[in-house]
Image (tube, rainbow, N blue to C red):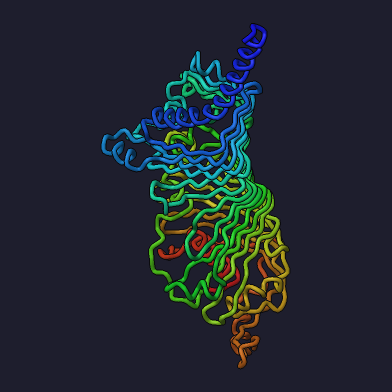
């Protein structure tokens, strides 16, 4: 063969060999990477996690990595062995990802210096289940950063990513038992900026999930609430720059109607229907979360409505409620809590009661409520400095009369002591008939109430204080249900007697304050004691015993 032809043949053969080698490498490198990745995940997690995925493509020149249908799941046999050896992690993860894209991956540094660096990581269609068995180890504070660092790094010294974006994820947090679900987040988006995992990550208190900044959005959060209520959270978001958690709406909604709810229980119980909007928890202390506690500067609720219903035709609940005042329940919370101030900017409160005699319902309503609660805490060290939890309340009673009140509850007081003082402004007496007719079979025919002042001090067992009522030209009618139960008939003789014993007006410009005492009904609530003590003073002011 001539030299020239031999040279061409060698060059063509070499070129063909190179092409074949390139094709072979492109074909086999994914197989090699696949085996290496799965092996690495198993090794660096002590064979706790198993990795499966498909369609891995990698552009080495551009540093682009794309993977589809990733599954990371724990090996239950390995986990059980870890439990027996007391080396089990505090949390387990089970993850499925539809698509993973990583831009600007710097592989040479990962191979030579055991450092993995990249630009942007984008995760689409993730379904993440976090299974936990405890937040604490003995009495020490548990921060999962150390465990997570070990699991994520393995033999690497450093992982650095410019940003991690998770889109359209579902997150389920529960116990190790798959049926135990604490909450479920739908349509979750997460942005982590400047993520760094290395040997110092666990000591950097300024980071969150290894990142300088975190932004979280969740369109819907589901929480189990039993057969009688449905809990819903919409529009949840968190930003680490100001450590503020925001919620567009939180609601507790009864699954049963008022009648069905009352019939489903053997005794009287309150039925709750609450809606809160534009909620913001400001300046959260993130360290306290790992202590399974909550500490923040303030909780602000933009708009809210609280509706409570009780059917008094049902048998009474004889269970003692002693020790269940709000401040006493706060002390018994299973986690430490400190909120500097809770603010209700604009609220509506309604208590609706179905009367046992009339079988009709009356409503006590407060409109345009603005309230603040200061020093909400159950931490003993802070209670030693200030043991007063103070509620300031301003509203319009029945949307007609101004109401102002201050309630001071003593925290960790053995007798549950509290004080409440306030006033109710002028109101036409007939405006009270939607309450007095169904709840007391009494109609106010005319008159006006100019002012009610009260100052009450209470304990677990009693309510004492002063009540001063200023009113004019009161005339009442005593009622009975009419024959077809569609309305009320006036009881003539009883009405005449009632107007005889009831004082028509208080003393001009100087109402006579009444000293009141009420012995608490042990199976009645905190607010029942306040109302009964106040009502005792009102009755004495008008001459009723």
Residue lying furthest front: 1
Please tell me how many numbered marks the rendered image carries.
0
**1 versus 333 height, above or below:** above
Which quadrant is the N terminus positioned in? top right
Residue at x 42%, y 56% (from the top left corner): 460
Q: Which residue: 42% across, 73% down?
A: 266
Q: Residue 260: x, y in percent?
A: 52, 75
Q: Name the residue furthest bottom.
A: 483
Viewer-proximal residue among 488 and 453: 488
Front one among 286 and 366: 286
Rendering coords of residue 314 (x, y %): 47, 76
Going by the image, does 377 lie left or right of 246?
A: left
Q: Position of residue 149 (x, y in %)?
A: 45, 26
Would residue 177 be found to the left or right of residue 219 on screen? left
Spot occupied by residue 173 in the image (x, y as percentages of width and height): 48, 46
Q: Quadrant of residue 539?
A: bottom right
Residue 200 higher or lower than 475, as above or below = above
Is any atom of residue 107 visible in this view? yes
Residue farthest to the top?
Answer: 3
User: Can residue 338 be seen in the rendering of this structure?
Assistant: no
Classify residue 358 by image quadrant.
bottom right
Image position of 274 (left or right of 292): right
């Amino acid at each position: 063969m001539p030299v020239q032809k031999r040279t061409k043949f060698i060059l063509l053969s070499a070129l063909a060999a190179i092409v074949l080698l390139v094709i072979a490498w492109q074909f086999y490198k994914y197989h090699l990477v696949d085996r290496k990745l799965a092996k690495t995940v198993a090794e660096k997690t002590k064979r706790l996690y198993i990795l499966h995925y498909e369609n891995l493509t990698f552009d080495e020149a551009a540093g682009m990595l794309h993977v589809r249908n990733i599954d990371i799941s724990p090996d239950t046999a390995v986990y059980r062995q870890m439990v027996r050896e007391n080396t089990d992690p505090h949390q387990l993860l089970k993850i499925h990802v539809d698509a993973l894209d990583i831009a600007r991956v710097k592989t040479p540094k990962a191979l030579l210096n055991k450092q993995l660096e990249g630009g942007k990581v984008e995760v689409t269609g993730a379904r993440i289940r976090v299974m936990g068995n405890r937040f604490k180890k003995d009495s020490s504070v548990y921060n999962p950063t150390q465990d997570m660092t070990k699991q994520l790094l393995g033999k690497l010294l450093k992982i650095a990513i410019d940003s991690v974006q998770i889109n359209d994820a579902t997150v389920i947090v529960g116990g190790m038992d798959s049926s135990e679900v604490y909450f479920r987040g739908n349509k979750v988006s997460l942005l982590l900026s400047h993520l760094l995992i290395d040997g110092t990550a666990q000591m950097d208190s300024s980071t969150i999930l290894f990142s300088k900044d975190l932004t979280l959005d969740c369109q819907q959060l589901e929480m189990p609430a039993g057969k009688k209520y449905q809990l819903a959270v919409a529009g949840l978001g968190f930003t680490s720059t100001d450590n503020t958690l925001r919620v567009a709406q939180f609601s507790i909604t009864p699954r049963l109607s008022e009648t069905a709810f009352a019939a489903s229980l053997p005794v009287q119980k309150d039925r709750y229907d609450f809606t809160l909007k534009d909620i913001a928890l400001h300046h959260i202390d993130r360290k306290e979360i790992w202590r399974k506690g909550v500490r923040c500067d303030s909780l602000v609720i933009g708009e809210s409505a609280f509706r409570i219903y009780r059917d008094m035709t049902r048998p009474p609940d004889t269970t003692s409620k002693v020790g269940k005042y709000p401040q006493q329940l706060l002390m018994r919370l299973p986690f430490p809590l400190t909120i500097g101030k809770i603010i209700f900017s604009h609220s509506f409160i309604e208590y609706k009661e179905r009367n046992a005699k009339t079988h009709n319902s009356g409503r006590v309503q407060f409109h345009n409520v603005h309230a603040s609660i200061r020093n909400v805490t159950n931490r003993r060290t802070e209670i030693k400095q200030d043991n007063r939890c103070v509620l300031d309340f301003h509203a319009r009673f029945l949307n007609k009369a101004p109401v102002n009140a201050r309630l001071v509850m003593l925290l960790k007081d053995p007798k549950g002591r509290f004080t409440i003082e306030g006033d109710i402004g002028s109101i036409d007496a007939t405006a009270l008939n939607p309450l007095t007719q169904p709840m007391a079979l009494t109609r106010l025919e005319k008159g006006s109430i100019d002012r009610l002042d009260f100052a009450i001090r209470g304990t677990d067992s009693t309510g004492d204080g002063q009540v001063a009522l200023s009113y004019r030209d009161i005339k009442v009618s005593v009622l009975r249900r009419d024959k077809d139960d569609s309305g009320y008939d006036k009881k003539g003789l009883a009405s005449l007697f009632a107007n005889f014993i009831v004082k028509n007006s208080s003393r001009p410009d100087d109402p006579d304050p009444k000293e009141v005492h009420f012995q608490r009904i042990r199976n009645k609530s905190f607010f029942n004691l306040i109302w009964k003590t106040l009502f005792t003073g009102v009755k004495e002011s008008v001459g009723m015993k």
